[in-house]
Image (cartoon, rainbow, N blue to C red):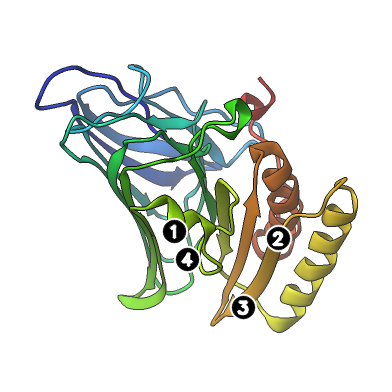
Amino acid sequence: MLQAVHSSRQGWQAEMNILLERRGEKTVMAGLTHKGPLRVQRPFYPEGDTSHIYLLHPPGGVVGGDGLNIHIQCKNQSHGLITTPGATKFYLSAGATANVDQVVDIGAGCALEWFPQESIFFTGAKVKARTCINLESNAHFMGWEISCFGRPVNRERFLHGHVHSRFLIRRDGRPLLSDHLQVSDPAHLSAAAGLRDYPMQGLFVATGGTETLLEECRDVLADAQARLAEPLPAGITLLDDLIVLRILGVHTEKMQSLMIPVWHLLRQKILNKSADIPRIWNT
């Protein structure tokens, strides 16, 4: 989701801290600090109260040695939606590893939606990435992460490199989900327990799930699959109160066409809000 290109042996080192709080009728960015090439645009309010925030990393791609750290806090009944204007591109490394660490702390009664565009790992990339979602009591989270190995549009495969990506969710310190994706050999992408020769995988997660909601999500997913010329490998399940959807694919748009209807349903059912697509997705 983040982008930077730099030729220095040290690489870009960037940090950002965002504090969201509800004040009056809407969520505001009550605190913002940044160091290095990380920025946010001013919040947008297409829904009136929910703060839509676009994370920006101007330089253009991530290379070996770069370090990117983002910390987001949600307090006082706040509700934010975080997205990015484009894909994150992780380029060939001359030896050093790029590190991306993203921590989201969601306070009691708050909600955070996390929808970065896809991460693209070029051949030769060396990356360690962690996204950690920490929830208090009745806090809510909905979000996705999409990974692309190589550039399937250009028929370029991921031939070598090392990618270790972790996606963690905890509630009151108790682990709910620990998802690890590790690729250090092209064979990992072909394995039955890997990506089965698909270059892309997507993970969508939402809190507040129930067996009834799971069945409704399965119906929505089936309808979305029926609209595709070729259905994608996809499965949806319930872990504690987490609804977890996994998809394999070749095109971001087709994968999102399965995830977005599920998000629409759950946002209405769990957060009591209809979904408002971030306008940057249409540009």
- 76 and 237: which one is in front? 237
Front residue (pair 132, 258): 258
- Say which residue appears at 53% left-offset and 57% top-offset: 190
Question: Could you tell me which residue is drawn at 37 percent across and 19 percent down?
Answer: 60
Question: Who is closer to the viewer here, 135 or 191?
Answer: 191
Between discs 4 and 1, the one toward the N terminus? 4
Image quadrant assignment for residue 44:
top right
Quickly name the residue at label 3: 238
Position in image of residue 205 (x %, y %): 56, 62
* Mark 2, other Cα within 10 Å: few <14 / some 14–19 / many ≥20: some
**Visible residue check, residue 270:** yes
Relative to 66, 207 lies left or right: right
Q: Residues within 10 Å of mark 1 (few under 14, many from 20)?
A: some
Distance CA(mark 4)–CA(mark 2)? 31 Å
Describe the element under mark 1 as helix, strand or loop.
helix
Secondary element at image label 3: strand
For mark 4, give the secondary structure.
Answer: loop
Asked if residue 39 is positioned above or below residue 125 in the image, the reply reads above
Position in image of residue 70 (x %, y %): 29, 41
Q: Earlier in the sequence, mark 2 or mark 3?
A: 2
Q: Amino acid at mark 1?
A: His
Image coordinates for residue 31, horizontal then vertical, percent? 29, 36
Image marks 2 and 1: residues in contact by CB distance under 8 Å = no
Q: Amino acid at mark 2?
A: Pro
- The C terminus, quarter of image: top right
CA–CA distance between discs 4 and 3? 18 Å
First-in-chain label (2 vs 1):
1
Earlier sequence position, callout 1 versus callout 3: 1
Mark toward the viewer: 4 or 2? 2
In front: label 4 or label 1 = 1
Q: Which residue is mark 4?
A: 139
Tag nearer the camera, 2 or 1: 1
